[in-house]
Image: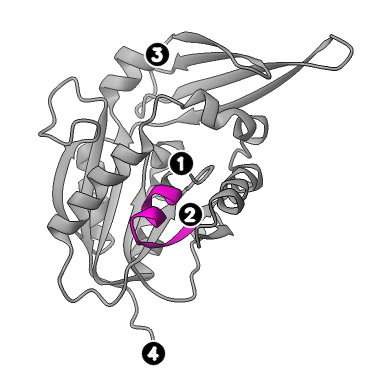
Amino acid sequence: MTPSYGVFAQYYDALTENVAYAARAEALCRLIAKWEQPDMPDRILLDLACGTGALSEEFARRGWDVIGIDSSEEMLSEALDKKYDSGLPIQYLKQDMRRLDLFGCISVTVCALDSLNHLPQLSDVRRTMERVNLFSNAGALFLFDLNTEYKHRCVLAEQCFAFDLPEAFCVWQNHCEDRAPDYPVQIRLDFFEQLADGKYRRSTEEFSEHIWQPAQIEALLHETGFTLLEVLDGDSYSAPVPETQRLLYIARASGGQQMPE
């Protein structure tokens, strides 16, 4: 079952205000320019698991025709609010990435900020890759990042964070199941929202992130028709080191279908 990220969606941007979306989009655009083929037919970019649309907005500002996909209605509602404010021509669709279904093919797919870690099974990652390849032009790029085992075990595990937001107080707790092979981090968010009568309403959301080892990901890319081009540290965009917290994969699609002209 896919989490809805209901209350989380309302406060997602405030809780992730440390993410430099403009800089991240700029770095990803440089990597796209490095690896894209000169005869790509269009500039359609798929933002897979787009969340509240912060990264989609940055790609649209850089001239991409953006399609944002997310399974959470609440996240997409926040994304649409941004779209109405900015006026950027982004198309948002409510879809599960494992069952991606588009009307045509795209030239670039981006899945950022550990979204694939949220899938519960490695078979779900495979299905997602298969669907991305199916709706990719031949030679299209797939850029995605994953949190590493180091981050789960040494950075996130058994940590508790408190956020005093303007409209709520949030307690974020992580617990790492280190006996499981994929080292899942169980994440619990407790939101305390003050009501008009001075009382507080408590809302709780829980979800998990799972570790997918580089060897597993590289094998899946090969099996689903991708050619791995490069693996980088997903924050510094340099060569990975043992303490790398996020790996960025860049792969080229074989292309699963040819759409009629």
Which residue lies most toward the front here?
86
Q: Quadrant of residue 75?
A: top right
Q: What stretch is highlighted in magenta?
A: 56-68
**Residue 196 coordinates in the image, percent (x, y):** 86, 17
The image shows residue 189, relative to residue 98, as above or below, that is: above
Precedes in sequence: disc 3 or disc 2: 2
Precedes in sequence: disc 4 or disc 2: 2
Who is closer to the viewer here, 261 or 133?
A: 261
Q: Are marks 3 and 1 in contact (CB under 8 Å)?
A: no
Query: As shown in the figure, which amino acid type bears the numbered disc 3?
Result: Ala
Q: Is mark 1 on a helix, strand or loop?
A: loop
The tag on residue 43 is: none
Precedes in sequence: disc 1 or disc 4: 1
Q: Name the residue under label 1.
A: 119
The residue that appears at 28% across and 28% down in the rendered structure is: 148
The tag on residue 260 is: 4
Query: As shown in the figure, which amino acid type bears the numbered disc 1?
Result: Leu
**Residue 170 coordinates in the image, percent (x, y):** 61, 15
What is the distance, in whole Å, between disc 4 and disc 2 at their CAs? Answer: 24 Å
Q: Is mark 3 on a helix, strand or loop?
A: loop
**Residue 9 coordinates in the image, percent (x, y):** 61, 35
Q: Mark 3 points at which residue?
A: 157
Q: What element carries label 2?
A: helix
Q: What element carries label 4?
A: loop
Query: As shown in the figure, which amino acid type bears the numbered disc 2?
Result: Met
Q: Can residue 127 be seen in this view?
A: no
- The figure's colour scheme reads one colour
Query: As shown in the figure, which amino acid type bears the numbered disc 4?
Result: Pro
Q: Do the residues labelled 1 and 2 touch (CB within 8 Å)?
A: yes
Q: How crowded is mark 4: few (under 14 residues within 10 Å), some or many (20 or more)?
A: few
Q: Name the residue under label 2.
A: 97
